[in-house]
Image (cartoon, rainbow, N blue to C red):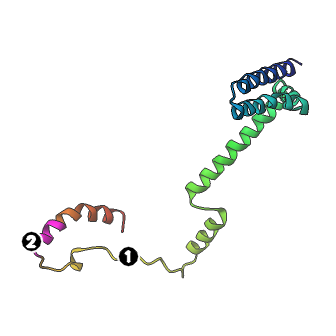
């Protein structure tokens, strides 16, 4: 009852502001203000305000929102754990089956970047470039790339 009265008062005040705005020859703004001011009374007439008031003061509704929140937290937790483990259950089963087979072939590894793959002699400018990339090569070797 109070919510309907407040919404009616807000709509009436908005329509008053729209009339004043139209009097000042700002018709586009006046129509926009009128549209916004009709929304609260429209919500009252459709019953949305009554439904919201009943929901806001209902302990059962708040318990339902709590249950939905717990369900959402559980769902997001399982998704995070699944991503951290590395895939879906189907992917893990396939990986476990291939690991159990003794005849399974191990994946090929890239050859390590060693000194033997480089030419023995280099010009003086190349040694300076080598110093610049030595840190990068160390990081790549550390990660097995």
The residue shown at (14%, 66%) is 128
Residue 92 appears at what percent x and percent y? 61, 65
Residue 124 part of the magenta segment: yes
Q: How many marks?
A: 2
Quadrant where the N terminus sits is top right
- Neighbor class of circle 1 (other Cα within 10 Å; few <14, some 14-19, many 20+) is few
Above or below, comparing residue 25 to residue 90 in the picture: above
- Neighbor class of circle 2 (other Cα within 10 Å; few <14, some 14-19, many 20+) is few
The residue shown at (66%, 63%) is 89
The answer to which of 97 and 143 lies nearer the viewer is 143
Going by the image, does 130 lie left or right of 43?
A: left
Residue 66 appears at what percent x and percent y? 75, 34
Disc 2 and disc 1 in contact, CB within 8 angstroms: no
Above or below, comparing residue 44 to residue 77 in the picture: above
For the residues carrying marks 2 and 1, which lies nearer the camera in this image? Answer: 2
The answer to which of 139 and 106 lies nearer the viewer is 139
Residues shaded magenta: 123-129
Q: What type of secondary structure mainly makes up the magenta span? A: helix
Earlier sequence position, callout 2 versus callout 1: 1
Disc 1 on helix, strand or loop? Answer: loop
The residue shown at (31%, 74%) is 112
Which residue matches tag 1?
Answer: 110
The answer to which of 84 and 58 lies nearer the viewer is 58
Res 118 quadrant in image? bottom left
Residue 137 appears at what percent x and percent y? 27, 65
Above or below, comparing residue 137 to residue 45 in the picture: below
Which residue matches tag 2?
Answer: 124
Disc assigned to residue 89: none
Quadrant where the C terminus sits is bottom left
Going by the image, does 121 lie left or right of 102?
A: left
């Amino acid at each position: 009852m109070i919510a309907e009265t407040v919404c009616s008062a807000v709509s009436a005040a908005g329509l008053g502001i729209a009339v004043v705005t139209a009097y000042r020859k700002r018709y586009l703004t006046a129509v926009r203000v009128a549209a916004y001011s009709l929304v609260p009374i429209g919500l009252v007439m459709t019953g949305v305000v009554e439904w919201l008031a009943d929901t806001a003061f209902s302990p059962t509704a708040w318990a339902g929102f709590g249950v939905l929140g717990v369900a959402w937290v559980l769902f997001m937790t399982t998704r995070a754990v699944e991503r951290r483990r590395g895939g879906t259950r189907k992917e893990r089963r396939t990986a476990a089956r291939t690991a159990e087979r003794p005849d399974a072939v191990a994946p090929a590894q890239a050859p390590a970047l060693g000194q033997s793959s480089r030419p023995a002699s280099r010009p003086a400018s190349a040694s300076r470039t080598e110093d610049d990339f030595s840190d990068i090569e160390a990081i790549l070797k550390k990660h097995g790339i």
